[in-house]
Image (cartoon, rainbow, N blue to C red):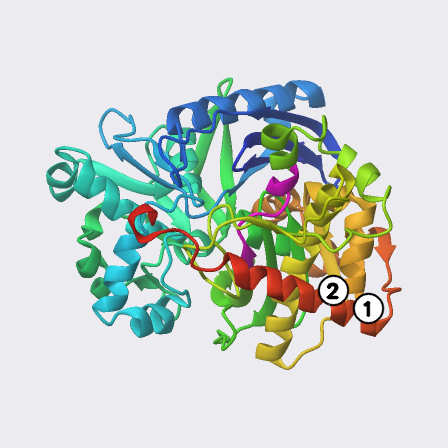
Amino acid sequence: MRRYILALDQGTTSCRAIVFDREQRIAGLAQREFTQHFPREGWVEHDATEIWECQRAVMLESIGRAGIGPQEIAAIGITNQRETTVLWDRLTGKPVYNAIVWQCRRTADTVEELRRRGLEDHIRAVTGLVPDAYFSGTKIKWILDNVPGVRERAQRGEVLFGTVDTWLLWNLTGGAVHATDRTNASRTMLYDIRKLDWDDTLLEALGIPRRILPQVRPSSEIYGCAEIEGVRIPVAGMAGDQQAALFGQACFEAGEAKNTYGTGCFLLMNTGETPFESRNGLITTIAAGAGDGVRYALEGSAFVGGAVIQWLRDELRIIDDARDAEYFARKVPDTGGVYLVPAFTGLGAPHWDMYARGAILGLTRGTRREHIIRAAEEAIAYEVADLVEAMEADTGMRITDLKADGGASRDGFLMGFEADMIGARVRRPEILETTALGAAYLAGLAVGVWESEEEIRRAWRAGAEFEPAMEESRRRELMEGWRRAVSRSLLWAPRGERG
């Protein structure tokens, strides 16, 4: 009897694979980091071949650790880092260039050109997004324009484009299926989220041939089959990582929200069947769901979340392990007036400043490393508080219960400070692997492992809860200091260095 679901969770810094049983328990887990490439200031790339090899390795390893055979796996679900762009040769399967990562800022000038051509309102109305180098469309154009011969080959139908989900699906199915799901398509800045089709105006503006684009399908259905040790297993669920986490947190109703504390921070609220237009710098996107119906979400993204703690470890070298940050943050009563703005790759919502840069402000002779570490921890909470405030202003709905997931949600100091900054309860689930779990749910629903979303909702359990305890006057004071610090970081990069 096939009673397990295999979830492939392809992230920005690592590949993970998790085997879940029908009771949503983890039977096997494997994870490996892969190489980050920074060829120039502001450029971020991955080797797409390394990603596939890494993901395939952890897939097989997780099955081995679960102590099961492939014949016991009912389906495979995929969730992925979004916006990261891969172009590859249709015949050989080899990438024509490194994957350009969502964090990469090289196409900032292209985005400015789109604005000068008067396309900003069209982009907002059709895609639900704001023009930014974050999204896939301008990354595709860069590869077509800058890798010799690729544009001509693409026009002849010899080159395919995909976000990482599409790249994995294509490899899993031996090149038989070139498809993406609606959640990933909605992050390309090329997809009409109401008509559910690629937008010809934007394809023409960026010079992207429609024939290189994948077919767009619902998030929960059988896409094709992978073969593992001679056993054919349906690939039956796909969603971008943040939409998968929203689904994995059982946020199925309008008004329910979650924040993922990963490399970046991503706050999503389910807004139901109607796309909600933001007036406060958020974006409208498609939420994952079972069946053919379309749900939407409002999203705010902070490009650097938990990555600021990695920066303390790897670049500043003032901590040895990311888990040490919580310990040092608690060693001081406050930051001593220090604020750290982690705008290393610009600022996302609600500011959308591609040219902002990181800053540490408020330093005095008495500043110690503990103050800087605590300021980095607090910065993550401030970023999310900005997003919550914008989301509440847009929707008129108060977030009283925020579900938290991602690696940094294990940090009790951060979760408690977050509750203080948003003035609401923060709930961390018992199963923290919500991104992979969301992909597993989508795949399992497609093949009948779970019967309904209601069955999934009943199984959601809180692992820890954090209630706000700070005086409102102190909260306002801290947030005002944060906003002053952010204002100093805006439009920092000189024009010659932009993009």
Mark 1 burial class by Cα count in 10 Å: few <14, some 14-19, many 20+: few
409 displayed left or right of 92: right
| Vertical position of residue 15 compared to residue 248: above or below | above
From this view, report whether residue 483 is shown above or below residue 87: below
Q: Examine the structure image and report whether residue 431 is included in the region drawn in magenta.
A: no
| Residue pictured at 33% horizontal, 46% vertical | 497
Q: Which segment did they paint magenta?
A: 301-309
The residue at 82%/68% (across/down) is 474
Is residue 452 in sight in this rendering? Answer: no
Disc 1 target residue: 474
Closer to us: 493 or 268: 493
Task: Give the residue number, with chain letter if any, for mark 2.
Answer: 478
Q: Residue at x 43, y 23 (%)?
A: 50
Considering depth in this image, is 361 or 48 the residue closer to the camera? 361
Residue 465 image point, x, y percent = 86, 55
Q: Amino acid at mark 1?
A: Arg
Q: Nearer the viewer, residue 152 or 7?
A: 152
Number of callouts in the render? Answer: 2
Relative image position of residue 156 (x, y in whole percent): 11, 40
Question: Label 2: few (<14), some or many (≥20) within 10 Å?
Answer: some
- Determine whether label 2 and label 1 are within 8 Å by CB: yes
Viewer-closest of 392 and 307 = 307
Q: Position of residue 183 (x, y in %)?
A: 47, 55
C-alpha span from label 2 to label 1? 6 Å
| SS under mark 1 | helix
Q: In the displayed structure, would residue 443 be above or below residue 31?
A: below
> Looking at numbered disc 2 in the image, what kind of residue is underneath it?
Leu
